[in-house]
Amino acid sequence: MPIRSLKGALRIALLIAIFFLGVWSQSSGVIDEFIFYLPDVQFLAVQHLWLTLMSGGLM
C-alpha cells in the first residue's frame, strides 16, 4: 500500500506516534494511576463543566 501524498504520510506518522504514546503510558503506570483516581476525575470534570456553564450564563 503506497502512500500517495504528504497528508497521508503525516496521518500515518501521527497514528504511530499515538500508538507509542499509549505504549509508554501503559508501561509507566499512567493509565493505572488514572483508573485509581477516576472517581475524583469524574467529580472534578462535572464541577468544571458546572462552573463553566455558570460563568457563561453570567455574562
Image (cartoon, rainbow, N blue to C red):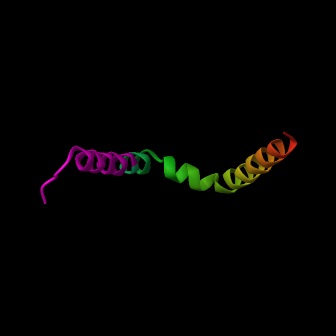
* Front-most of residues 53 and 40: 53
At horizontal 27% and vertical 44% (from top left) the residue drawn is 10
Residue extending farthest left: 2
Residue 38, picture quadrant = bottom right
Numbered range of the magenta stretch: 1-21
From the image, which quarter does the C terminus lie in?
Answer: top right
Rendering coords of residue 52 (x, y %)? 76, 45
Q: Residue at x 34, y 51 (%)?
A: 19
- For residue 30, side relative to residue 8 (left or right): right
**Residue 14 at x, y = what percent?**
32, 46
Q: Is residue 58 left or right of residue 12?
A: right
Q: Residue at x 64, y 51 (%)?
A: 37
Image quadrant holding the N terminus, namely: bottom left
Q: Position of residue 8 (x, y in %)?
A: 25, 50
In this rendered view, identify the residue nearer to me: 50 or 5.
Answer: 5
Residue 35 horizontal side relative to residue 42, left or right: left
Apparent side of residue 49 relative to residue 30 in the rendered image (left or right): right
Comparing 28 with 22, the one in front is 22
